[in-house]
Amino acid sequence: MSKIQQLSIFLENRPGQLTDITTLLSQNQLSIKSINLIDSSDYGILRVIVDDSQKAKEILDDAGISLKIVEVFAVEIDNHLGSFNEVASLLSTHGINIQYTYTINTTQNGAFIFKVEPTLLDKTIELLKQNGIKILEDIRS
């Protein structure tokens, strides 16, 4: 399984919103593996990968927090110039649009997280594997 479940959480852009979420996760023994916050003037989208996305969804749903689970994938970062460009160029050449991307670091490696059109997710993962690009099965700290 190369797909990773990411929580996408809609937040108001005001003090305490992020802490409310991270406190709930922490109090329920959920480990944050990756976190990315994008904001505008009134709201933000928090993208979080945790060690148990279903448990996190239940806890946040029960707290009345609006979220959805999105499938993404992680590409291991090679430590050489142009490693991101290799992946982006391969996807572009095959007509696959990257909807968003961000990086993470673990004690074992670094990775690029990618979101593509859900209907193209399996095709994208297979394409990358066929071209020698390592897809991470999960994210460990």
Image (spheres, helix red, strand yellow):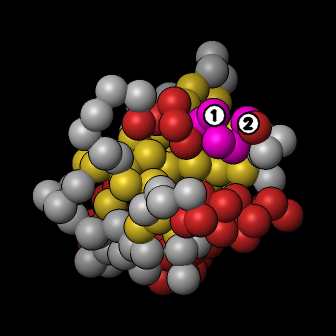
Amino acid type, label 2: Ser
Q: In which quarter of the image is residue 33?
A: bottom left
Amino acid type, label 1: Ser
Most extreme residue toward the front is 131
Main SS, magenta residues? helix
Q: Quadrant of the C terminus?
A: bottom left
Compute the Cα span from label 2 to label 1.
5 Å
* Picture residue at 14% right of the left edge, 58% below the top: 107
* Image position of 33 with respect to 53: above or below: above
Q: Mark 2 points at which residue?
A: 92
Q: Mark 1 points at which residue?
A: 89
* Image position of 121 with respect to 95: above or below: below
- What is the magenta range? 88-92
Element under label 1?
A: helix
Q: Where is residue 69 in the image (x, y as percent from the top left)?
A: 65, 66
* Picture residue at 27% right of the left edge, 69% below the top: 140
Q: Quadrant of the N terminus?
A: bottom right
Q: Where is residue 18 in the image (x, y as percent from the top left)?
A: 42, 43
Q: Can see residue 135?
A: yes
Q: Position of residue 63 (x, y in %)?
A: 55, 68
Query: Dots 2 and 1: beta carbons under 8 Å?
Result: yes
Q: Where is residue 28 in the image (x, y as percent from the top left)?
A: 32, 77
Q: Tell me the crowding category of disc 2: few under 14, some 14 to 19, or many 20 or more residues within 10 angstroms, Cα based.
A: few
Q: Between 73 and 28, which is closer to the camera in this rendering?
A: 73
